[in-house]
Image (cartoon, rainbow, N blue to C red):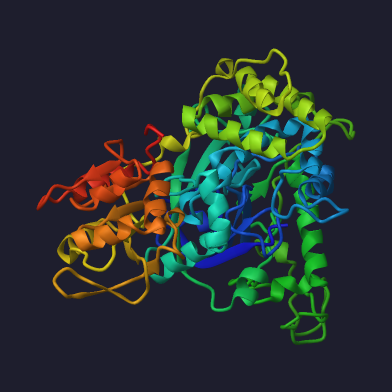
């Protein structure tokens, strides 16, 4: 699981003490920078899978607190497929390649996955998220993260508060379109990995705010869902987010294997003041993640590897064995002991970890709680909270995935499940597959919730956006440099893309360094495109098939496009005229401000095709 990963070092700082909720030191002092290591990853596929597959993304954070290691092991989607941890192996087998022919890799568009989902209705909420734009993020820097499960915070007085953990990107949540994701798998299969590395190397350090949803124990029955169900969110309208701290990633690994590959996360790595709940899937993970690491490393001493070691004192009597790098001196390797020179106290007597003493009563049985039984309302809530274009992308994703399924009974079962989320969506997908959908539910009855649509995110910055400046020999270098400087002032990254490598000759004889070629770059690697002026340059681009494809493709994907006066000829030659997000410059006029405003919108979906 999570084989294709990227990692980075950084630190976390809390904004103000949270001692009223938790005694954890990581939340106590705003002046302390707690070191962290974060690993982002694809869930599905092999290590050689392209970064841009449709998939949930792992977002795992290791905090090296002064009290020990805390691992917050989550995804970029706030819910999960299953409620019962015993189904983990079946789920993983289902979305991995089919066992007889080992195909397809890094894709769920096949019989096995959808057969499992069609027989597991609790997955429908997660399926809606995975078919949404959230599953094809623009970058790791432009996605949110979630702890998924319900945890507890415990303060010094022993009072517990239920909590959901969220990572919120200040850059907003942005995604690729499916056509871009597929093209990038060929143009640059390391697209997300490269983006993260380059951003840190350039000093544009990725940031995420830690936000908490807090629910007093006495209020857990006042919400209309079971807070322990991992297939459910806590709608922000009912339980607001409180932003409490910031994570900053400011250093790339020195060695990929020793850090990004050997890091080992486990949701049972906790510190005092942070505890688990009775979420049954989380309880299963407490076993399965440790079991996974034991199988990966062949020894419990994986915590001794440098990337996994705590940066705080450790007091235990473990020693010897594979990967054991440090052993205690002395005769006693057990507790209690009375030998001279050996520690006598139990770690718990020195403030070691003790679980919150929650009351448990009743008969132990293996069955689902009745409160876990509603599998469709929140799926409909999510779908109805999206914009029309986001809903359209879910429809297209379902059509693509289910059209790859060759078993008509599996397709039919899925149409019946989709109808219980939204009848019109089921009808559209069913018509595409040649199947009749049953009379379905109206998702609008599920209501709307804030924080679910990506379009609600910030649209006031172009920081770290990548812009392709397209030009050829004879370019008007004054216009080009002016636009480049305007973009850099706003924190964007401009790259000169030309028909060849080396340097470009400006209209007045100057030389300009080329960053990429039209053949190797592709508009899918950029957030916006500027066509520089200069008649000689534009005439060459007009006769270049790759240049024409470059700008038309960017237009089709809804990206901001600007052109200097002569550059407008290239846009018009490929059918781009006046449209939202298209900016034409007049001779001598500086339209960089209008271009930047267009970029802030990220996409312009309301263009004529």
The foreground one among 140 and 522 is 522
Q: Quadrant of residue 401?
A: top right
Which residue: 38% across, 32% down? 608
Which residue: 14% across, 51% down? 590
For residue 261, above or below residue 154: below
Which residue: 76% across, 80% down? 324
The foreground one among 572 and 321 is 572
Image coords of residue 520 (percent x, y): 46, 65
Can the viewer see residue 589 in this picture? yes
Report whether 318 appears left or right of 519: right
Q: Quadrant of residue 86?
A: top right
Image coords of residue 65 (percent x, y): 56, 64
How many numbered discs? 0
For residue 486, above or below residue 449: below
For residue 422, above or below residue 102: above
Image coords of residue 176 (percent x, y): 50, 47
Q: For the view shown, which residue lies furthest in the top direction?
A: 439
Q: For the view shown, which residue lies furthest in the left direction?
A: 588
The foreground one among 323 and 45 is 45
Image coords of residue 528 (percent x, y): 35, 51
Q: For the view shown, which residue lies furthest in the front direction?
A: 543
The foreground one among 602 and 148 is 602
Report whether 399 appears left or right of 483: right
Which residue: 74% across, 72% down? 302
Can the viewer see residue 387 in this picture? no
- The quadrant of the rendering that contains the N terminus is bottom right
- The quadrant of the rendering that contains the C terminus is top left
């Amino acid at each position: 699981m999570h084989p294709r990963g990227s990692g980075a070092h950084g630190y976390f700082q809390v904004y103000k003490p949270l001692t009223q909720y938790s005694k954890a030191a990581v939340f106590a002092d705003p002046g302390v920078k707690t070191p962290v290591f974060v690993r982002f990853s694809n869930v599905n596929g092999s290590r050689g899978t392209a970064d841009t597959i449709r998939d949930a993304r792992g977002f795992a954070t290791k905090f090296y607190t002064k009290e020990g290691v805390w691992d917050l092991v989550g995804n970029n989607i706030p819910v999960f497929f299953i409620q019962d941890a015993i189904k983990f192996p079946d789920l993983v087998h289902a979305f991995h390649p089919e066992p007889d022919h080992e195909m397809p890799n890094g894709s769920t568009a096949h019989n096995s996955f959808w057969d499992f989902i069609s027989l597991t209705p609790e997955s429908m909420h997660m399926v809606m998220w995975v078919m949404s734009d959230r599953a094809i993020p623009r970058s790791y820097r432009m996605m949110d993260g979630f702890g998924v499960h319900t945890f507890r915070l415990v303060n010094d007085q022993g009072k517990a508060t239920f909590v959901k953990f969220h990572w919120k990107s200040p850059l907003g949540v942005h995604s690729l379109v499916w056509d871009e994701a597929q093209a990038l798998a060929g143009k640059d299969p390391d697209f997300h990995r490269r983006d993260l590395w380059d951003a840190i190397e350039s000093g544009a350090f990725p940031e995420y705010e830690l936000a908490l949803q807090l629910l007093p124990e006495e209020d857990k029955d006042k919400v209309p869902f079971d807070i322990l169900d991992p297939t459910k969110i806590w709608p922000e309208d009912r339980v607001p987010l409180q932003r409490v701290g910031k994570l900053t990633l400011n250093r790339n690994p020195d060695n990929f294997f020793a850090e990004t590959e050997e890091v080992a996360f486990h949701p049972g790595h906790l510190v005092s003041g942070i505890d688990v709940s009775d979420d049954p899937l989380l309880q299963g993970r407490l076993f399965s993640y440790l079991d996974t690491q034991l199988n990966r490393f062949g020894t419990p001493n994986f915590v001794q590897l440098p990337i996994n070691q705590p940066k705080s004192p450790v007091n235990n009597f473990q020693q010897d064995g594979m990967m054991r790098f440090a052993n205690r001196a002395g005769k006693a390797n057990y507790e209690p002991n009375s030998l001279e020179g050996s520690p006598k106290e139990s770690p718990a007597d020195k403030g070691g970890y003790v679980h919150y003493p929650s009351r448990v009563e009743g008969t132990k049985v293996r069955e689902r709680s009745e409160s876990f039984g509603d599998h469709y309302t929140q799926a409909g809530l999510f779908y109805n909270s999206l914009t029309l274009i986001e809903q359209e992308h879910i429809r297209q994703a379902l059509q693509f995935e289910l059209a790859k399924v060759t078993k008509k009974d599996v397709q039919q079962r899925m149409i019946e499940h989709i109808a219980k989320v939204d009848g019109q969506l089921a009808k559209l997908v069913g018509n595409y597959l040649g199947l009749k959908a049953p009379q379905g539910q109206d998702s609008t009855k599920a209501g709307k919730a804030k924080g679910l649509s990506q379009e609600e995110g910030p649209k006031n910055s172009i920081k770290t956006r990548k812009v392709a400046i397209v030009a050829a020999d004879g370019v008007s270098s004054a216009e080009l440099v002016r636009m480049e400087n305007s973009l850099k002032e706003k924190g964007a990254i401009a790259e000169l893309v030309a028909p060849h490598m080396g340097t470009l000759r400006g209209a007045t004889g100057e030389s300009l360094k080329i960053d990429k070629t039209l053949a190797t770059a592709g508009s899918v690697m950029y957030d916006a495109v500027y066509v520089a002026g200069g008649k000689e340059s534009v005439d060459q681009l007009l006769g270049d098939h790759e240049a024409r494809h470059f700008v038309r493709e960017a237009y089709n994907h809804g990206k901001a496009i600007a052109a200097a006066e002569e550059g407008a000829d290239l846009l018009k030659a490929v059918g781009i005229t006046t449209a939202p997000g298209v900016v034409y410059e007049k001779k001598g006029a500086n339209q960089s401000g209008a271009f930047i405003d267009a970029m802030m919108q990220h996409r312009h979906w309301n263009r004529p095709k």
